[in-house]
Image: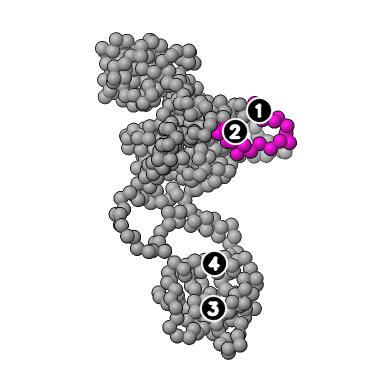
Amino acid sequence: MEVNGNLNIRDVYRPLSFVEILFRGTVQIFHPGHDRLFLSLPAYDSLQHQGGVNYRLVSEACYILANNRDGFFTTDRAGSQRVPDDHPLLIIGKYYYWCDLGDPLYPVVVDFAAWTFSHELPASWSRHRTDQECAERDLYSYSRSDMSDGVKLTDKACIATRYETPYGCQNAHLVPRDQEDWFNANGMDQYSVNMSAGIQDVANGVTLRSDVHAFFEGNGFVFYPPTSDGSEFVPYVCMRVPVYAELLHRRSVVMHTRVAEQFLYARFAYTMISRVPSSWTTLNTVVPIPQAIFTIRQAKQKYKEKAPTSPHHSHHHGDMAEAIAHHIGASSLKQTVSEEEDFAAYEKGWKETFAQRFPWIQQLPEVEDPPNILVTGAHIDGPRMLRLRREYMERNPQVQQVVGPTASELDLMHEPEDDGVDDVPTAPAYCKLQKAWSFAHGIHFLRFVLMASTNMKCQPFESEPTAHSIPGPASMVSPLHSAFPHKDNPAPVVLPSSV
């Protein structure tokens, strides 16, 4: 409020004095073969006045670090004092992770590129979508260049803080962009909404406030399923930063249905692998990077070193791909089979990917002689086409306001011929019609023709055609819009079921 031209100054902003999340210590996981720390997590959870970290989270993190090997925890290096797995928390302290196979010198994943994605997710990570949610997910298809706008448009706000201003929110990649080689090598595009977008698909992004985004990129927290059915996800802070622990830890978030749980799981693995101490890189017991990814990295580095540095030089993605292919030879980047087996392995891989992407198609009955059906009841890309049509109509409301042609256009549609039949549209008349109609009329005409082609089966006329027997624009009536009036029949003419 203004008093005598001066503003009343408010007190300095202070955070709430009540703090719910407290740092209580750390949970440390050691390797039994080397007696070396390979994972440390802050304990922000508590149960019966004991601090700890969620047991299932630590177990799944160690499963990933052990290169997808199940195991158990012990309090001693010998492996005799096993920790019960029925407790919700792993209490603050020092533990050893043993693989079920009993190998104390199992290798550890210290580089995300060396980790192989397990396409069979744990049950707690599987989001059970309804049929309607699966259909709606296909509506959110954007190109690579439109990923950021598409993510922020569908999320509408930061999913963690509900901060809504467009200036302070950013698109956060789940699988980082610099891991595109790993993304392609592991076939992660099958979980995208738009498979051609690859790592730049909206299924691989969420909207976060700028500072929360920076904390996320610094591997400060992960999105983790708090229940065993994968119905929701919460931020779980894994870095000792009390301010963000209070702000984010175990808060409910709005995870859009377009987001793939496979990418959330991959980000969980990426964050946990990043917490392995750098001293592990000097040991021999580490999981090596696959040769395909290592070769791609080398080829890219050599291309960058040889590429001209002139600002006027145009760098094309195709040039880099060609240089990489020349460097590694004629063999495929993703295949390790011999050349004579390349085609068979490639075809088998695509069939498996298609089966995983569309499992319901595999359940359809097979027929030896399928009928010659030219028109199907539904198209696999139908939801996307409906979304594009809806967006176009929203951006161009004037199209919906056009209900019929003008008087001059009607004259063109029904130009008389020499035979005395006035109502039969001729080929020249249609040419003139195409030139005379505006863009909006053209859109309506095209939609009517498409709708007629999916509901009519053209047959030869048994008698001489008349004005009312030829399916022209006047007789093509959309169920969503008004039909064009016929100059001799003002009432809408309903499209016949068969002609």
Find the distance from the CA under tag 1 to the CA under tag 4: 51 Å
Find the distance from the CA under tag 2 to the CA under tag 1: 10 Å
Query: Mark 1 or 3 closer to N-term?
Result: 1
The image shows a total of numbered marks equal to 4
Residue density around tag 2, few if under 14, some if 14–19, many if 20 or more, within 10 Å: some
Camera-nearest label, 3 or 2: 2
Residue density around tag 3, few if under 14, some if 14–19, many if 20 or more, within 10 Å: some
Q: Position of residue 198 (x, y in %)?
A: 50, 40
Contact (Cβ within 8 Å) of mark 4 with mark 2: no
Residue under circle 2?
323
Furthest-front residue in this view: 340
Camera-nearest label, 1 or 3: 1
Residue under circle 4?
446
Query: Which disc number belongs to residue 306?
Result: 1
- Secondary structure at badge 1 equals helix
- Which range of residues does the magenta coloring cover? 305-326
Taking depth in this image into account, of 403 and 68 the one nearest to the observer is 68
Query: Mark 3 or 4 closer to N-term?
Result: 4
Q: What sort of colour scheme is used for the picture?
A: one colour
The residue located at (32%, 37%) in the rendering is: 229
Q: Is 274 above or below relative to 422?
A: above
Residue under circle 3?
485
Q: Is 399 above or below relative to 194?
A: below
Three-letter amino acid code at the position of disc 1: Lys
Contact (Cβ within 8 Å) of mark 2 with mark 1: yes
Query: Mark 1 or 4 closer to N-term?
Result: 1
- Secondary structure at badge 3 equals loop
Q: Position of residue 60 (x, y in %)?
A: 36, 26
Q: Is residue 332 visible?
A: yes
Camera-nearest label, 4 or 2: 2
- Secondary structure at badge 4 equals helix
Q: To which quarter of the image does residue 429 belong?
A: bottom right
